[in-house]
Image (cartoon, rainbow, N blue to C red):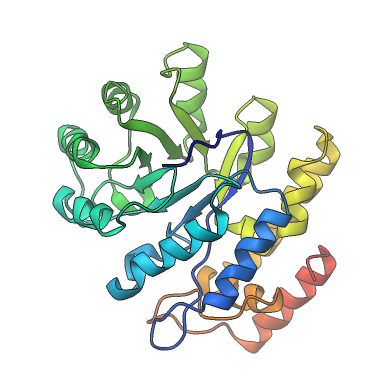
Amino acid sequence: MSEILLKGGFYPALGTPTDEDGKLNKKSFITQIELMLESGAAGMLCLGSMGKMTSIREREYKKIATVCSELVSGKVPVMTGVMDCSALRVIDRIESLGRIDIEGVVATSPFYSRLKPDQVINFFRMVSKESGYPLYIYDLPSVTQSPVTKEILLTLMKEDNIKGIKTANLDLILDLKRNDLFRKDFEVFFSGLDLFDAALKMGVTKNLDGMFTCTPRNSKAMYFSDDDQDIITCSLKNILKLRNIFAKETIVSGYTYSMELLGCGGSYHRDFDTPVSEKLKTEIYECMKEIKEI
C-alpha cells in the first residue's frame, strides 16, 4: 500500500483505452497517465466509471491496474475500482490484484437492483473486513439506485478499513464537516464536476472526475491558480463546455475522440457504444482548440 499523503487537488478518473478486441492500448494509457502527472494531478483513480471498469475484459483487469500502479508508484496515490454486484465478487476482484502498490480500492454499492440501507451497510462491512487494501466508498446513486446517506456513512465510518468516500453530494460533505463528524483519517473526494469551483471556496479541495483527463491544461490552470477565482471559474467553464458537447450524443464516445486528439488513441467507450458523428467530431475539435487543449 502506498504511504503517499492524500493532498488537495485534482484526481483524474483515468480512461482505459482498448482495441477492438478489448485489449489494453498500453502506449496510449501510459501517455494519458504521463499527461496527468505533468499537469500536477494529486492522485488518480484507475478503472472507475470513466475507466469502464464494469465492461473491461477479466483477462485485462489486473494488467491495467498493474500498468498504472507501476508507472505512478512513488509519485502520487492511485486507487483502483473493484465494482461488482456482490461482496464475494468484489472480494475476488480485490484478491486478483495481488499486492500491487496502490493506496486503496474503490467500490460502489451493488448496482443490479436497489438496496435497503442495511444491505448497503452489510455489503461495505463485508468487503472492508476481507480487503487487503483500504476501502473507499463510491457513492453513485444515479447508477446503483442506493445513495449513501448520512446515517449509512456515520455507521460505516466505524469500520477502520473504510478510509474514505467519493461522492457528488456536496450537502452531505458540508453537513458532516460543519458538525465535525468526519473521522480524522477519513478522506473525502468530491465528484460533482459542475460545483468544483463552489466546493473549492468551501474548503472541499480533493476533487475527482474523468473530465480532467481530456482537459489537462485547464485542469492544471484551475488547481494551480493561487486561488484566483477568475481563473478557476474560466477553467471550469471550459471543462464543462467540452463535457456538454460530448453529451449531445454519447459522453464516452465523445470522450474517445477527445483523447484521440490529445494523442491517446484507442476506444474509451463500451463495446456496444457507437462512435460519435462527424458533425460532433468537428464540434469537439473546435471546442478543444478554443479552450487551448490542442
Q: In this view, which residue lies farthest toward the top?
A: 179
Q: Is residue 207 left or right of residue 225?
A: left
State the image coordinates of residue 122 (x, y, percent, origin top left).
Answer: 16, 35
State the image coordinates of residue 186 (x, y, percent, origin top left).
Answer: 43, 26
State the image coordinates of residue 77 (x, y, percent, origin top left).
Answer: 53, 44
**Image vertical order of residue 15 relative to residue 283, above or below:** above
- Kindly identify the residue that appears in the image at 62 percent across and 32 percent down: 205
Toward which corner of the image does residue 129 lie, by quadrant? Answer: top left
Classify the position of the N terminus by image quarter: top left
- Kindly identify the residue that appears in the image at 32 percent across and 54 percent down: 82
- Judging depth in this view, the residue of 6 and 190 nearest the camera is 6
**Image vertical order of residue 273 relative to residue 82, above or below:** below
Classify the position of the C terminus by image quarter: bottom right
- Judging depth in this view, the residue of 134 and 86 nearest the camera is 134
- Judging depth in this view, the residue of 167 and 71 nearest the camera is 71
Q: Please count the marks in the image.
A: 0
**Image vertical order of residue 121 relative to residue 272, above or below:** above
